[in-house]
Amino acid sequence: MPVDHEMYGFDYDSAVAYLGPAKLLFTFNPHLLFKRSNAEAGLAKLHMIHAVVMDLNTMKIEQTMDWRIHDANQYLWPAGPGRVLVHVGRELRMYGSQLKQEQTIALDGRLAFVTTSPSKTYFAVGVVQERTRRKYIGNWCARKVVNRKKTSKYVCSTLNCMS
């Protein structure tokens, strides 16, 4: 294995997404120490992600922001023109082209998956909730992003899985 094997490893410490034809979002883990709240004390994978929006025409940074990410899984998905969906804590947040938070979806359990349609008009969200040691209930919700306003349509269901 090469000495720089971590450079070629697949992880979610960084991500890149377009927020428009000339806006690029870079996100990365700056590997800084930070104070944990009492609620975050048990989160072994808690880390900070720094987000930077750059205008590609001027090559100037337009906006920066930090997110506290609770796990080592994927945290960012493109969600249509000029928008991204970000998993922060127990929420999914929709951000616009200047990292202005447009919508929030509260999660009532651990995020299992997010997948977006090819058109980025719909996304499906799965949440795992442990009920007993042998029975897990997974909730999923397909959401249609209608426009930049807070109007959206939901189709939700519950999946029961016995192990």
Image (spheres, rainbow, N blue to C red):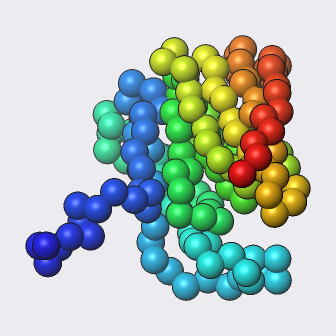
Furthest toward the left, the residue is: 2
The residue depicted at 69 percent of the width and 36 percent of the height is 125
Residue 24 in the image: above or below residue 29: above
Residue 149 in the image: above or below residue 109: above
Q: Residue 58: name its quadrant.
A: top left
x%, y% of residue 119? 51, 15
In the drawing, does residue 126 fall left or right of residue 14? right
x%, y% of residue 136? 79, 50
Is residue 150 or residue 152 the one in the foreground?
A: 152
The residue depicted at 73 percent of the width and 81 percent of the height is 42
Is residue 77 or residue 155 the one in the foreground?
A: 155
Residue 133 in the image: above or below residue 150: below
Quadrant location of the N terminus? bottom left
The residue depicted at 61 percent of the width and 42 percent of the height is 113
Please say whether residue 5 is visible from this viewpoint. yes
Residue 136 in the image: above or below residue 97: below
Q: Residue 34: name its quadrant.
A: bottom right
x%, y% of residue 130? 82, 57
